[in-house]
Image (spheres, rainbow, N blue to C red):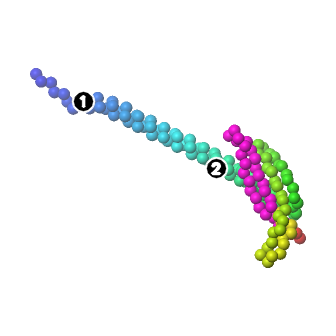
Amino acid sequence: MKVKFSSRKRSKGFLLLEVVLALGVFAIACTGLTVAFHRMADAAKLAQSELRITRILDSALTEQLSFPTVEESVIQIPVEGTDIELDVVIEPIENLENQDGELLQQMFHITVTANWFENGSWQSRSAETWRYNLMYQP
């Protein structure tokens, strides 16, 4: 008597191998997605930190420009609720002429530098502007 093997019995052995391979491919895809999500979270955290520092610097520059007059000075200002310290440096600009060749008096260079400790080292960012004192006089 001849025994015939049906094709169904042979495919059952391959079915287990196919499931194992599918699980392996799925695991690799999940690992890739997890790494991608982790990198996106790190990028979002960095962007949020940069935006926070930019807003603090912009606010400090706006505050310095809001005074009716400025004078040469160096000021250190701690930012409340954070570990950030601002260094404000106001220095006069000498020998600056306008396009008519007239010497501009009372011109100042204002630099605000934010310093903070992050990721095991000191970080620093700065913003700067110029201020013509006589422009804001009544």
Q: Is residue 66 visible?
A: no
Identity of the residue drawn at 52% across and 39% down: 34
Alpha-carbon distance for marks 1 and 2? 56 Å
Which one is nearer the viewer's eye here, 112 or 22?
A: 112
Is residue 8 a member of the stretch shown in magenta? no
Observer-side mark, 1 or 2, equals 2
- Amino acid type of disc 1? Arg
Residue 57, located in which quarter of the rendered image?
bottom right
Q: Position of residue 48 (x, y in %)?
A: 66, 48
Residue 91, located in which quarter of the rendered image?
bottom right
In which quadrant is the C terminus drawn? bottom right
- Identify the residue position indicated by label 2 in the image: 47
Q: Position of residue 31 (x, y in %)?
A: 48, 38
Residue 61, located in which quarter of the rendered image?
bottom right
Helix, strand or loop at mark 2: helix
The answer to whether residue 29 is left or right of residue 100 is left
Identity of the residue drawn at 83% across and 49% down: 76
Q: Is residue 101 visible?
A: yes
Give the dominant element type of the magenta stretch: helix, strand or loop: strand
Check disc 2: other Cα within 10 Å, few if <14, some if 14-19, many if 20+. Answer: few
Identity of the residue drawn at 57% across and 45% down: 40
- Identify the residue position indicated by label 1 in the image: 10
In the image as oriented, which residue stretches furthest toward the left? 1
The answer to whether residue 71 is left or right of residue 98 is right
Which one is nearer the viewer's eye here, 43 or 26?
A: 43
Helix, strand or loop at mark 1: helix
Q: Earlier in the sequence, mark 1 or mark 2?
A: 1
Q: Which residues are magenta?
A: 109-133
- Amino acid type of disc 2? Ala
